[in-house]
Amino acid sequence: MPLFDPADFRIPPGITHVCAGGETPFLRRHDAALLRYAQDKSGGPPGRDAQDAVVLRARDRVATAWGVARADIGFCAHVAEGVSLVVESLDWQPGDNIVVDPDEYPSVVAPLALQRHPKVELRFARIGDAAAVAAQVDARTRMIGVSAVSFLTGERHDLAALRRVADQVGALLVVDYTQAAGYLEIRPDVADFAFAACYKWLLGMTGTAIAYWNRARQPGWMPGTAGWHSIASMGRPDYAGDLALVPDAMRFARGNPAHASLYVLDSALDYLAGFAPAAVQAHVQGLTTALLARLDEAGIASTTPAAPARHGASVCIASPDAAAITRALFERGVYAWNGRGRIRFSFHGFNTAADVERIMAALREEWRG
């Protein structure tokens, strides 16, 4: 049985929707959230007060779900912006390096790869192997960047082990929780900074990403740039002096937060709060392990580790024909995700065991392995 009522979502009739790792279907309740935003935006000063209240409420909901203080939680436009703000804040020196997985998502790596003044060395290690990461770090390693769950394979990474490696050389640990937030327990305090896009398992939309600043580990952190929203007073600032920043993680928002997407995120987090986090994890991982077992029976190899403790909510299959197979599955009513030479099936609370069987039936007809 589904954990979420599929009727709560804009899922076309008769469709198996397993695209949560790319885009989840929209919650119908978000229509009302967007209407509230439109009304508040049109409401003058009281309307802006209402928008600010939604931002605070969304921060509180994230903080509660993640087990941290509201002041640790801010918002930025997307994970790439948040990572870029951290990268730009560091006093890089010639010879500095960072360590990432060679298959890490670009939002984590690109802000570092394009660092030019000075150029920063990129070092690569399989991030699931803490010993391999430890072999790459040294006294000049400034950062380890990692996705908590791989977008490419669905593998879940040992963040505590990476924290220990980072601490050995005084490096930052920057974590992207995009492929984990919404169904896995998030303990962001293992990271110095952490981010999560909101349009996947968090059931939100694009335009807003969660930004976490571990103020206990990095109490003096300041971004390298600011805007009217991230300075402490924008009334008549003394530009000739030192501009004070807001004291909390909202310094990640240099300008207006994306209010419309935050109304949607607030609605999504309210919906998710109606389900025990452990129940959501158990549901989606019950489906992933079932699909992995069925693939193994059919002789179709998956790049996703079989043990639930080592994978998230996605099952990935590498294939040179991934694009064509994904299109064929779509025509059969199975909405899967394609990209980078693999097919990805990502489950959420609206999926059922019947979806696993439908995936297998469609794959048996279309598989070209």
Image: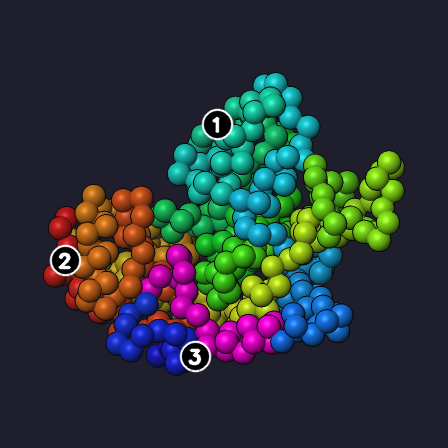
Please give the residue where the numbered disc 3 appears in the rendered image.
8
Magenta-highlighted residues: 18-38
Measured as percent of width and height from the top left, residue 101 is found at 44, 36
Q: Is residue 56 visible?
A: yes
Q: Mark 3: few, some, or many residues within 10 Å (few <14, many ≥20)?
A: some
Please give the residue where the numbered disc 2 appears in the rendered image.
366
Q: What residue type is labelled 2?
A: Glu
Q: Is residue 337 left or right of residue 135?
A: left
Check contact, mark 3 vs mark 1: CB within 8 A.
Answer: no
Quarter holding residue 313: bottom left
Query: In whole angstroms, how far apart are the C-alphas of marks 3 and 1?
Result: 45 Å
Q: Which amino acid does label 3 sit on?
A: Asp
Residue at 55% in and 69% down: 264
Q: Quadrant of the N terminus?
A: bottom left
* Vertical position of residue 227 compared to residue 353: above or below: above
Residue at 77% in and 40% down: 220
Element type at marker 1? strand
Query: In whole angstroms, how far apart are the C-alphas of marks 2 and 3?
Result: 31 Å
Residue 181 is one of the magenta-drawn residues? no
Q: Mark 2: few, some, or many residues within 10 Å (few <14, many ≥20)?
A: some
Measured as percent of width and height from the top left, residue 338 is found at 30, 52
Q: Nearer the viewer, residue 22 or 47?
A: 47
Please give the residue where the numbered disc 1 appears in the rendered image.
123
Q: Which dot marks residue 169? A: none
* Vertical position of residue 199 compared to residue 108: above or below: below
Q: Can residue 269 be seen in this view?
A: no
Measured as percent of width and height from the top left, residue 57 is found at 68, 69
